[in-house]
């Protein structure tokens, strides 16, 4: 009882403290999680939950969030007459979740909203079905997010591993989930004007995968048909480490639902790891080989148990330097006595985000940038009067690093309007060389503008570039005799790329 009261007091204090600030940003989204749980009643242990996070962004790195959700899981199923169907009618487990706590983001690249996320919450578990007890709980999560900014806001995709432990009456409740969150955040804070050249020091890929197909599994006991099968579904998340353009280490968890015909199906949680061979420099195909361990859930006795599994697959790999998609046929089968009845053939469709140029294996044009601009193109000459002597106003005089290729140039033209005698400056998004900036190791900009517009032009330039997907290391100014013309000439040194 005391813990429950403490939870309520903490949740209320967090919300009041957040709303008292006038400059907070807002964050709202949706979360889907799968995993395992346990309570003081017999459960099948597999579970599914949905949650809605609503939060306040206090600083670039710190926020507070309130979560409202629902978690559910099946009861233990037992087949007593050997027909493959659960003969017990005990209630399934279901509960409403309400919690709140701080959210910390450890940025690795703010320009693309990449960072590690840590959450800690206290809350209350209100059981709505089964005979399990209701009471308070604590909740801790660690995850990884990526995202993008648009129209003054930010969109985030987050994958997290979450643990939950009840206390007092709910002391036997515990859960471990893998969750996926999509959220929108109002952008109240400026970005650091630099970004990590190589997050983690690795070229990595990250993305979801789904599969549909046919399944089969020999059944036990022998009073049921020796072999049954049906449809199967898979949802997976894959993390890859690109060793070269052609070889990638892949690993990650997945959820697999196996329909076994007339008998109850089997749910599996698996952890897989292996290699992907990418032949995109020759032909847009891949070959993948994975191995791992699966945990099975369903009516007892199960035709497929816990144990080792393997998977081989091949298909088409298509995309560009920022990401790729793949589609193919994958076959999964068991490796030991408890899983040797498993057979699943699935059509899979997935996508990958690449941390750096070449990480997906799809940056096939060595002499062209990701945006399609040739490195041999001559820079556009801006239609301005002869410039005055440039003067440095920002950045350092560090020697540019050309080890990843010669510098490339791009010119952006500002829109200058006159509103009731006041000139306003705007940089259209289609003028920003986002693809070049995203993978840049160093960026220098020469601003060509009338002296009275120089400050406004620089502010608009930094706001437009740094809140999207770029960096600026140094700026210089050159005067212009035309009162309503302003341009930015970018000199961009490419960053690392897999060879």
Image (spheres, rainbow, N blue to C red):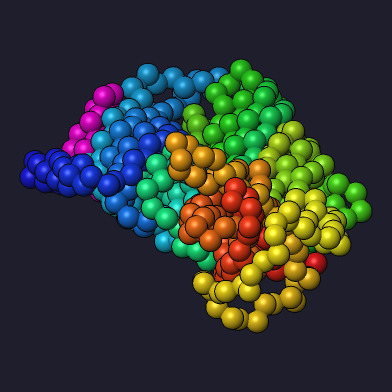
Task: Tell me the quarter of the image containing the C terminus.
Answer: bottom right
Task: Measuring from the top left, give residue 39's x and y in whole percent.
Answer: 29, 39
- Tell me which secondary structure the magenta stretch mostly adopts: strand
Identify which residue, 381 or 282, lies in the foreground: 381
Task: Measuring from the top left, give residue 97's x and y in whole percent.
Answer: 28, 34
Task: Measuring from the top left, give residue 149's x and y in whole percent.
Answer: 51, 45
Q: Measuring 50% from the left and 57% from the top, which residue is drawn there? A: 452
Q: Can residue 36 be seen in this view?
A: no
Q: Measuring 49% from the left and 44% from the top, which residue is drawn there? A: 424
The picture quadrant where one finds residue 217 is top right
Residue 167 is a magenta residue: no
Q: Measuring 34% from the left and 40% from the top, which residue is drawn there? A: 26
Drawn side of residue 401 relative to residue 63, left or right:
right
Task: Tell me the quarter of the image containing the N terminus.
Answer: top left
In this picture, is 134 found above or below 438?
A: above
Drawn side of residue 219 relative to residue 125, left or right:
right
The picture quadrant where one finds residue 99 is top left
Q: Measuring 36% from the left and 57% from the top, which residue is drawn there? A: 61
In this picture, is 1 found above or below 381?
A: above
In this picture, is 53 found above or below 398?
A: above
Extreme left residue here? 2
Residue stretch rendered in magenta on the structure: 124-139
């Amino acid at each position: 009882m005391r813990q429950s009261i403490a939870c309520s007091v903490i949740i209320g204090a967090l919300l009041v403290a957040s709303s008292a600030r006038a400059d907070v940003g807002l964050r709202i989204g949706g979360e889907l999680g799968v995993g395992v749980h346990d309570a003081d009643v017999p459960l099948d242990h597999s579970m599914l939950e949905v949650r809605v996070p609503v939060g306040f962004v206090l600083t670039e790195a710190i926020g507070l969030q309130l979560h409202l959700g629902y978690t559910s899981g099946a009861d233990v199923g037992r087949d007593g007459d050997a027909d493959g169907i659960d003969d017990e009618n005990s209630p399934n487990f279901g509960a409403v979740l309400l919690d709140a706590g701080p959210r910390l983001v450890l940025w690795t690249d703010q320009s693309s909203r990449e960072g590690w996320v840590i959450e800690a919450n206290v809350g209350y578990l209100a059981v709505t079905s089964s005979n399990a007890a209701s009471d308070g709980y604590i909740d801790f999560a660690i995850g990884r997010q990526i995202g993008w900014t648009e129209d003054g806001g930010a969109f985030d995709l987050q994958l997290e591993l979450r643990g939950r432990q009840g206390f007092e009456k709910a002391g036997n409740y515990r859960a471990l989930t893998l969750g996926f969150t999509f959220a929108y955040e109002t952008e109240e804070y400026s970005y650091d004007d630099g970004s990590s050249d190589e997050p983690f020091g690795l070229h990595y890929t990250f993305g979801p995968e789904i599969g549909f197909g046919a399944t089969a599994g020999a059944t036990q006991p022998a009073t049921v048909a020796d072999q049954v099968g049906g449809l199967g579904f898979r949802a997976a998340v894959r993390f890859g480490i690109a060793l070269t353009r052609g070889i990638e280490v892949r690993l990650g968890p997945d959820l697999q639902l196996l329909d076994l015909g007339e008998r109850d199906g089997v749910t599996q949680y698996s952890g897989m790891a292996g290699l992907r061979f990418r032949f995109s420099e020759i032909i847009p195909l891949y070959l993948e080989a994975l191995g791992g361990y699966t945990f099975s859930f369903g009516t007892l006795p199960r035709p497929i148990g816990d144990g080792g599994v393997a998977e081989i697959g091949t298909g088409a790999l298509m995309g560009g330097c920022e990401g790729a998609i793949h589609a193919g046929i994958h076959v999964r089968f068991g490796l030991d006595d408890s899983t040797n009845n498993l057979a699943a053939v699935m059509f899979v469709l997935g996508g990958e985000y690449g941390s750096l140029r070449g990480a997906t294996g799809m940056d096939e044009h060595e002499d062209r940038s990701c945006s399609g601009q040739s490195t041999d193109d001559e820079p556009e000459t801006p239609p301005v009067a002869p410039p005055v002597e440039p003067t440095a106003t920002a950045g350092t005089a560090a020697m540019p690093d050309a080890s990843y290729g010669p510098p490339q140039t791009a010119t952006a033209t500002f829109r200058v309007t006159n509103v009731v005698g006041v000139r306003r400056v705007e940089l259209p998004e289609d003028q920003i060389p986002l693809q070049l900036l995203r993978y840049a190791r160093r960026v220098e900009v020469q601003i060509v503008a009338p002296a009275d517009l120089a400050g406004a032009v620089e502010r608009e330039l930094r706001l437009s570039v740094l809140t999207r997907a770029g960096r600026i290391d140094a700026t210089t100014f050159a005067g212009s005799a035309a009162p309503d013309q302003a341009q930015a000439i970018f000199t961009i040194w490419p960053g690392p790329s897999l060879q």
